Amino acid sequence: MRIVSVPCLSDNFAYLVTCPTTGATAVVDPGEPGPIEAALAAAGLTPTAIWATHHHPDHVGGVAGLAARFPGVAVIGHASDAARIAGLTRGVVAGDRVELGSLTATIIENPGHTSGAISYLIDADGEAAVFTGDTLFGAGCGRMFEGTPPQMHASLARLAALPPATRVYFGHEYTAANLRFAAAVEPGNPAIAARAAAIDAARPTTPSTIADERATNPFLRVAEPAVRAAAVAFDATVDPADGAAVFGAIRRWKDGFRG
Ligand code: ZN
Ligand code: FE
């Protein structure tokens, strides 16, 4: 598969995903139409589908413009977001399969950032990619606007369980700031310092891998003794054996963190 990242708005990423045999192309999370249309034109591609990870305007703000420019384009999003994603042509739920030429994406539900947040997982001949929107970021995760800590913790655990080599295409360039927070949570984790040094020379930071995230992302590491201890140091009422409670404390700490 071919994947092109398209910076949108101030720090969003949209993506063009193309089937190498048919040329069928999906646009993931078009936050605005202009940069997408320019990237499509530069690559000589016509989109057949738009894949929305969730309903927030910085991820679907370009849907109407692209649908007008490319009549007949399919617009995919979670079934529960039919009233929140204008122009939705197909609502999907967990386990649904979305065809793109000879590629197939499988839908993973990950409620928490929003109730209808989903990821698109493509496994093409052992080369896997997952588009996670604002659920899983480089070294971080989205805020819980419409979910509880147990929900968001379970959603992230589902992504963390994907094969380590799976490439993670996330929705925002927040990795550097996220790594500053990760280092505050786990000052003794050398993988965090190594990743921070590596990204200084490499922007954009998308994609990462599930292996990178498992090694450095505090929100996937709530079972680690150092992360549990940091959560208890932040909030002494947290039971360190309760993964969702540890997750919730780390998320609240990050909400107020100015690194
Ligand atoms: Zn969002
Ligand atoms: Fe966003």
Image (cartoon, rainbow, N blue to C red):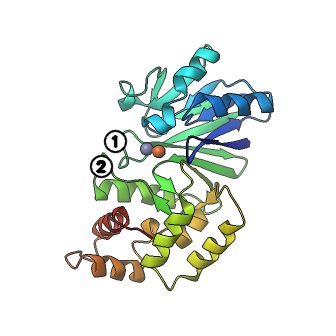
Q: Position of residue 89 (x, y in %)?
A: 49, 20
Q: Position of residue 62 (x, y in %)?
A: 55, 28
Residue at 33% x, 65% y: name it.
Answer: 256
Work out whether mark 2 precedes mark 1 in sequence or the reverse, and give the earlier one: 1
Q: Which residue is mark 1?
A: 115
Q: Residues within 10 Å of mark 2 (few under 14, many from 20)?
A: some
Counting every numbered tag in the picture gives 2
Q: Position of residue 77 (x, y in %)?
A: 47, 31
Q: Amino acid at mark 1?
A: Ser
Residue 126 vertical position relative to residue 114 in the rendered view, above or below: below
Secondary structure beneath dot 1 equals: loop
Residue 192 vertical position relative to residue 151 in the rendered view, above or below: below
Q: Position of residue 171 (x, y in %)?
A: 54, 47
Look at the image and tell me in which quarter the C terminus lies: bottom left
Could you say which is closer to the camera, residue 65 or residue 10?
A: 10
Q: Which residue is mark 2?
A: 147
Could you say which is closer to the camera, residue 195 or residue 242?
A: 195
> Quarter-wise, where is residue 70 in the image?
top right
Q: In this view of the protein, can residue 93 be seen by the observer?
A: yes
Q: Amino acid at mark 2?
A: Gly
Secondary structure beneath dot 2 equals: loop
CB under 8 Å between callouts 2 and 1?
yes
Quadrant of picture, ligand 1? top left
Look at the image and tell me in which quarter the N terminus lies: top right
Find residue 64 and name its label. Answer: none
Q: Is residue 107 left or right of residue 200?
A: left
Residue at 27% x, 68% y: name it.
Answer: 245
